[in-house]
Amino acid sequence: MQKPKDESVYCFNVEYYDKMASLIRKYALFYHLQNGMIEMYDPKNRRTFLKKCRYESIGLKDLYIGSKISVYSRLLTVVSYGDEFTRRSLQKASAKALCVVKAPAYELAGKILDCLIQSGFILTNAKLCSLKLSQAMEFVGDKNMQNEAKSMAVDQIFAFEVSCKDAVSKLNTICGLAQAPLDAKLKKVLAKLPVETALYTSSSAGEVQRQSDFIFGKAIKASSTFNNCTVCAVKPQAMKDGYAGMVIDSILSEGYEISGMEMFRLDVDAAKEFLEVYDTVVPYYSAMVKHMTEGPVLAMEVRTEKEKTVSSFREFVGPSDPVIARHIRPHTLRAKFGKDKVANGIHCTDLPEDGVLESEFFFSILQKAK
């Protein structure tokens, strides 16, 4: 099968790991820009794998090198552009940039991320971690930037990988690091905190690739405590709607500590295991599993020094049905960011005894499996 001659069709090479056969299966995925339809072709067996169809959870912004998408319960990785037209059209449009929020701006991390999202960036990866000085030096990659490295090794840092057209240039312009004034919204967020004290941004596309590979690689583990904690997971629909920064800010503003954070893509098996407690309990369990595989999930370990962290945070998240939440608990997270009972914006730990278990699921089990 050749690519359709219509040049409003983009082509991507994708891979799927077949656990049963222990094989990596390769396909060509076509995205039709005019109507958002997709189709897939199996080049090895020279046959259509998926006929042209509409798939609501996948849009063009979800298709970039390294992204993971779920198509009918198969978790696919976009490994390369399928043709020169697609590469030429999308390479600059889906360029990546890296923004590190340093310890002095910890409480502002959500507001900073929301500024970037409101400016047109898409969040493609995220992690909260701690770096040793040697690791921070390796990250910055320049012996002359020892002070910068030291500022990142003081305490936990948020690393946000974001994507948009001319991402590096745009991010540095917003941050006032490219001979341009600091963005007005970001200036308001930082107040009197100097940009250099609050943020670090990569200087080039090459640096973004190297530093992202380092910070999001297995060598740097996401922070976690597994102590007096609960889990907050921003679900795919809320991620797609650009609410990640607002959710982070709401949690921190309420006085909770975010002690762990990482972005994950769940396959069906992982989603079933994580949501197993709801099987036979809620009638829409299968829909919940499906939704958790439809895009990235931003998992956070949330904690306080007080007792009953799980129950207090569950109250803050609100009723599972956002429609009900908007009527009786309008200030809760699900009331603000949820859509319906399945895509309700936020998952949070329900049972007090499951707080540590759910944190271990993301920040130990899934982290090791990455």
Image (cartoon, grey):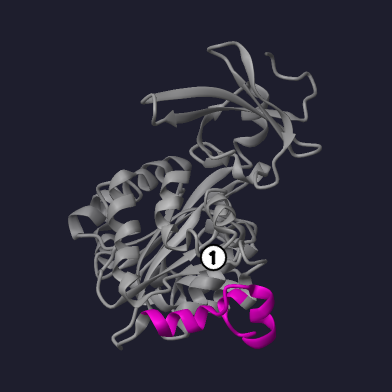
Q: Residue at x 41, y 83 (%)?
A: 311
Left or right: where 370 falls relative to 317: left
Q: Residue at x 57, y 56 (%)?
A: 236
Left or right: where 118 falls relative to 368: right
- State the residue lying farthest toward the front: 280
Quadrant of the image occupied by residue 155: bottom left
Q: Indicate yes or no whether the magenta region holds residue 332.
A: yes
Q: Indicate yes or no whether the magenta region holds residue 199.
A: no
Residue 267 visible to an observer of this rendering? no
In front: 102, or 285? Answer: 285
Residue 227 visible to an observer of this rendering? yes
Question: Where's residue 231, x and y in %?
Answer: 39, 69
Numbered disc 1: secondary structure: helix
* Range of residues picked out in magenta: 310-334
Q: Residue at x 56, y 50 (%)?
A: 290
In front: 258, or 113? Answer: 258
Residue type at numbered disc 1:
Ala
For the N terminus, the quadrant is top right
Q: Which residue in the protein does label 1 denote? A: 244
Looking at the magenta stretch, what is its main secondary structure? helix
Quadrant of the image occupied by residue 223: bottom left
Question: Where's residue 82, x and y in %?
Answer: 60, 23
Question: Where's residue 167, x and y in %?
Answer: 56, 49
| 226 vs 123: above or below | below
Q: How many marks?
A: 1
